[in-house]
Amino acid sequence: LAEKWNGGFRFEVIPERWVSGVPFTLDWGGAAVRVRTAYSADVTSQSAGTSVLTLQARWNEHHGFSFNADGDYVPPTLSCRAAGNPPPPPHGAPWPPPPPPSPPSP
């Protein structure tokens, strides 16, 4: 919580790593919170008690993102997940290569 006023607040998040396009979900525990203006993130979706913000290409001056919201501040449960799944292992020759076949017996 960076700042609080009557009927709203400003919240700031500083991720450990910045990866553009990664969504952050804030679960407000059912509280009526609505993100109004976001900085260095886009508001992807909002529903009753949940806000999802997606990281933009650049962070703010504190190396994070922030937003102004309407409602009474309730500490949110914050979660994020990397965009997409990790790539599958490469397909190719096994390493080390198998031994050559044995010569035919006489």
Image (cartoon, helix red, strand yellow):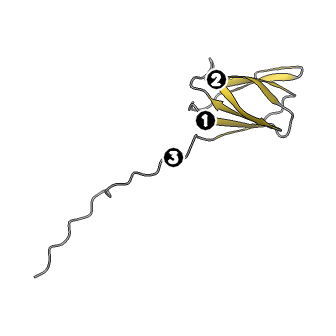
* One can see residue 93 in this view: yes
Crowding around mark 1 (Cα neighbors within 10 Å: few <14, some 14 to 19, many 20+) is: some
Q: Are marks 2 and 1 in contact (CB under 8 Å)?
A: no
Residue 83 horizontal side relative to residue 26, left or right: left
Is 26 above or below relative to 35?
below
Is 71 above or below relative to 28?
above
Crowding around mark 2 (Cα neighbors within 10 Å: few <14, some 14 to 19, many 20+) is: some
Q: Which mark is residue 86?
A: 3
- At label 1, which amino acid type do we have? Val
Residue 26: x, y in percent?
74, 36
Q: Dot 2 corresponds to which residue?
A: 40
Residue 84: x, y in percent?
56, 43
Please give the name of the residue rendered at 84% of the width and 23% of the height, measured from the top-left corner: 8
Mark found first going from the N terminus, 1 or 3: 1
- Could you tell me which secondary element the residue under label 3 belongs to? loop
Tell me the distance, in whole angstroms, between the alpha carbons under discs 2 and 1: 12 Å
Q: Which mark is residue 22?
A: 1
Residue 60: x, y in percent?
63, 20
